[in-house]
Amino acid sequence: MLKDDIIRILEENRGKPVSGQEIADTYNVSRNAVWKAINSLKESGYNIISGRNSGYYIDDNTDVISEQGIRHYLNEDNKELKIRKYNQIDSTNNEAKRLIISEDIDRMLLVANEQTAGRGRMGRAFYSPGDTGIYMSLIYKVPGGVKAPMLITMAAAVAVARTIEKFSDNRPSIKWVNDIYLGEKKVCGILTEAVTDLETGMAEKVVVGIGINVKTKDFPDELKKKADSLGIDKVSRNELIAGVTDELIKLYGEFDSESFMKEYIDHNNVVGRKIKYERNEDTLVGTVEEICMDGSLNVKAEDGIITNIFTGEILFFNQ
């Protein structure tokens, strides 16, 4: 589509005017066709500036998620990554699993401007309003099969933390296992789901879903005391998505817990804190002693007994 081609050339030249004639010549269309496509893009939310003698360019304040914009910011090694962008969808993780069933996909990025049924761990809803957040899922085929889903989630948390630190002065922390915090409020959630091959019975692929509150200001009443946003205005969501994706692929390509667990532990906000852990009908109250290199927690109960926790969810005692 001509509109996609125009987005691509304007993203590649962001901040630098491109003449209508150059666009027309590049894609072998008329100037009038270019003008109509530009107007259609403006109606879709793109703030495209045009002048009689200066050409067209995307205003720096434009923050519309696009495949072309994401691809522009990806590292050279990842430029050919398959990307699908949705304006609105139920859940990028749901769509990723549907695609794995219907298509032969080893690696693909799915992004949405809005989710109507975003999901987090434990079946909870993830608030996903349009135009303010990042909702993405990476389909990734794991060589040799998925052996440690929790470590895959932890690597994703490190990827998000690295990206936040790269593009802002924020110092994020990680709440075991999968939440990213600024201060005492959550700004990002991660949901990793393994997909089993029915023929081999092996979980060969994972879907890593990531939701980030980038500019979200209005939260439902039940989230106002728990959630916050990054508040990053000078970096586009396309650039943030590309940054997280590059870090994910880098970490999964050299997958070794030694390469990221020390970083994960360094960013944690749970060690030394009193927590409550519920699993089935059992409730454990204690203080987190350490995060082990396999991703598990050692929790010291009030009676001095130390319990090793591999799965489940913890709550800070004051929550």
Image (cartoon, helix red, strand yellow):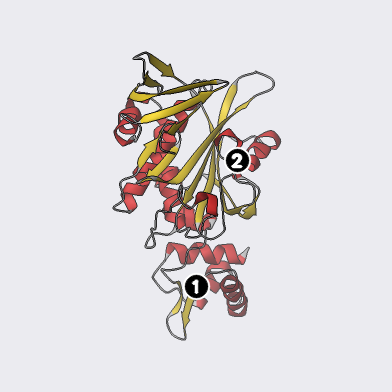
Which dot, 2 or 1, sits closer to the camera?
2
Decide: is 75 above or below 130.
above
Image coords of residue 196 (percent x, y) = 63, 25
Query: Is 207 on the left-hand or right-hand side of 53?
Result: right
- Mark 1 — residue? 47
Decide: is 203 above or below 129.
above
Query: Is 241 on the left-hand or right-hand side of 27?
Result: left
Image coords of residue 35 (percent x, y) = 58, 78
Instruction: Specify whether residue 282 is in view.
Output: yes
Decide: is 135 above or below 302.
below
Q: Viewer-proximal residue, 77 or 115? A: 115
**Disc 2 to disc 1, how far (Cα)?**
30 Å
Instruction: Give the amino acid at mark 1.
Output: Asn
Quadrant, the C terminus: top left
Residue at 42% across / 66% down in the picture?
A: 13
Instruction: Specify whether residue 74 is in view.
Output: no
Decide: is 58 above or below 217.
below
Q: Earlier in the sequence, mark 2 or mark 1?
A: 1
Mark 2 is surrounded, within 10 Å at the Cα level, by few (under 14), some (14 to 19) or many (20 or more) other residues, namely many
